[in-house]
Image (cartoon, helix red, strand yellow):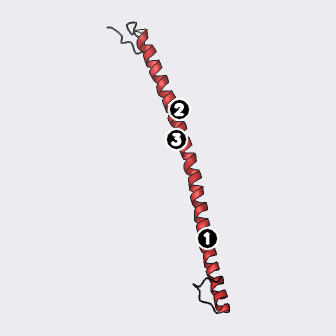
Amino acid sequence: MIKPDTHWHLDKRVPVAIIIALLMQTAGALVWAGAASERLSTLEGRTQSLTKMNVRTARLEEQVIYMRATLDRIENKLDRSMGAPSNRINP
């Protein structure tokens, strides 16, 4: 009875060119994956900075609204104290 070989082995009929081609293909895939990872990291960083800028912009918008309301109140008080219409421009 012939005992089957359970160990892995490389057949002598496999050309060296195929082994080199597989190694080069694997290396290329690893380089591509590294470059893709770097691009993703860059985009994540940009996204985080844009999120911070959106929050700051929203805060500034709220402050501008508050300042505009304050200026409107000041203008109305000045107009009432001077007796002038609110849309009139004095020279």
Query: Distance of mark 1 from mark 2, alpha carbons?
Result: 45 Å
Residue lying furthest left: 1
Q: Quadrant of residue 81?
A: bottom right
Residue 86 falls left or right of residue 5: right
| Residue neighbourhood size for the residue with mark 2, other residues' Cα within 10 Å, grouped as few (<14), some (14–19), many (≥20) | few
Query: Distance of mark 3 from mark 1, alpha carbons?
Result: 36 Å
Q: Are marks 3 and 2 in contact (CB under 8 Å)?
A: no
Q: Earlier in the sequence, mark 3 or mark 2?
A: 2
Q: Quadrant of residue 88?
A: bottom right
Q: Earlier in the sequence, mark 3 or mark 1?
A: 3
Q: Residue 68 at x, y = what percent?
A: 61, 75
Residue that carries the numbered disc 3 in the rendered image = 40
Q: Amino acid at mark 1?
A: Val
Q: Are marks 3 and 1 in contact (CB under 8 Å)?
A: no
> Residue sitting at 67 percent across and 91 percent down?
82
Residue 48 sits above or below residue 70 on the image: above
Residue 39 sits above or below residue 75 on the image: above
| Residue neighbourhood size for the residue with mark 3, other residues' Cα within 10 Å, grouped as few (<14), some (14–19), many (≥20) | few
Residue that carries the numbered disc 2 in the rendered image = 34
Q: Which secondary structure, mark 2?
A: helix
Which of the labelled discs sits on residue 64, or is there none?
A: 1
Q: Earlier in the sequence, mark 1 or mark 2?
A: 2
